[in-house]
Image: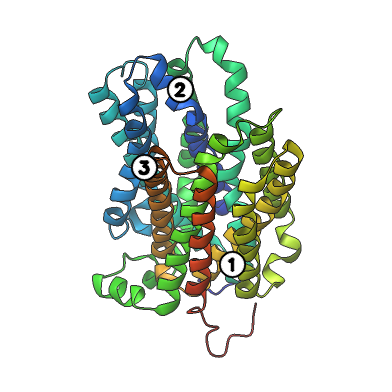
Amino acid sequence: MPDETSPRPLLSLEFSLLAGISFFAFCNLAVFYGFHAYLGQIGIAPEWRGFLLGLEPFTAFVLRLVLIPLIGVGNATRVLLAGLLLLVLVLVSYRWALTVPSLALLRILHGAAFVVLVSACINLVVRFIPEDRSAQGFSLFSLTTLLPYAIMPPLAERLLPWFGGAANLYAGVALLAIPALLLLVWGGPRLEAALAGLDQGLTRRPSRAELVADLREPAVRALLAFNLCFYLSYSAVFYFLKDFGGHLEGHAVGDFFLFSTAMILVLRLASGLFLDRLPKLPFLILATVVLVVTVPSLALATSEAGLEALGLFYGLGVGLALPLLNALLFQRSPPALRGVNTNLSLFMMDAGFFLTPWLGGLFLAGGGAVGNLFVANAAILALGLGFLTAVRKPTGESSP
């Protein structure tokens, strides 16, 4: 019977099954790129639009810590099914939610469905990533969160006239939950059988004492703190670059994200050739230095070509940093707590995506310049470099 140390292929049926479910789940989020504009179209007052926009990631932020100790490998497949069904209900309901109270309730339920679904999926997938290919595994799995943002916005723009409005489009996206449900129903028994072969110490839910001991580990705390710094900076670029670059000719901001996403995709697809052969901590530091230089440079861009070039460097930094960061956290975590710590890193992501729009919006409303916002977030990334100094190579470890 296989155990956690047995050699396993990375692209196992279980890994591929969970990657497919994750892809279809993230497609629903990627289609909400125009939600702020949609709220204006249905007559929601401006002062409520940012609140409603941020309510979904805020709900995920609040719920994730509550859910982490409650979701274990033993119940993750059932939780995954419940999350998919709730997601379908929420997406269809956008057609009838036209007031602030109804939309607020729906955004809370949307955040709950998403965090339940992703937390369960992550808790499962880390059991099927071979330790010696952890960077490649996280790099490939991250494609399931990246590709929807490359596919859905342009697809949605072309489908919008056919659906007759954004609310109908959101409901239509619920159809993408059907392939995910079919994958789960078809592959559920295979997942259960594979998990049954793991040591019970790896599949049980961790105790409170184990969680406290885990968070006392300097490397774990440092990597989670770096996660927060990374996503505070990342979400600043995502949410506020258009406020800065809108004056540039052509499609400068859109091309920035096109070029950066293309670079990230190239790095993800090529990851099997080099990522797990790299010394992870030094290259994570190097990738972060690239971002520390690139992010404030955005404030100096004066042409479309300049912003596009910065997009390539930004994609290089993000494309290298994220899989290396996830791999380091994976390697520094006890096997039984890898799912927990990966979900804690997602909690930091939720925090970044909630705090940056809120604090950044207050900064801009007070007369602050977007360029200064980029400089401040580069400083936050530099602070993150300081946290990485607490990450040390474990005694006796010889692999990268």
Q: Residue 14 placed where, x, y %?
A: 55, 53
Say what secondary structure mark 3 lies in: helix
The residue nearer to you, when weighing 46 against 323, is: 46
Where, quadrant-wise, is the C terminus in this rendering? Answer: bottom right
- Residue 362 has which mark? 3
The amino acid type found where label 2 is placed reads Ala
Tell which residue pokes out farthest to the front in this image.
367
Q: Against 213, is 259 above or below? A: above
| Measured Cα–Cα span from mark 2 to mark 1 | 43 Å
Q: Which is more N-terminal, label 3 or label 1?
A: 1
Pointer 2: residues within 10 angstroms few (<14), some, or many (20+)? few
The answer to the question of whether label 2 and label 1 lie on touching residues, with beta carbons closer than 8 A, is no
The amino acid type found where label 3 is placed reads Leu
- Residue 97 has which mark? none
Residue labelled with disc 1: 130
| Measured Cα–Cα span from mark 2 to mark 3 | 20 Å
Q: Quadrant of residue 11?
A: bottom right
The amino acid type found where label 1 is placed reads Pro
Residue labelled with disc 2: 37
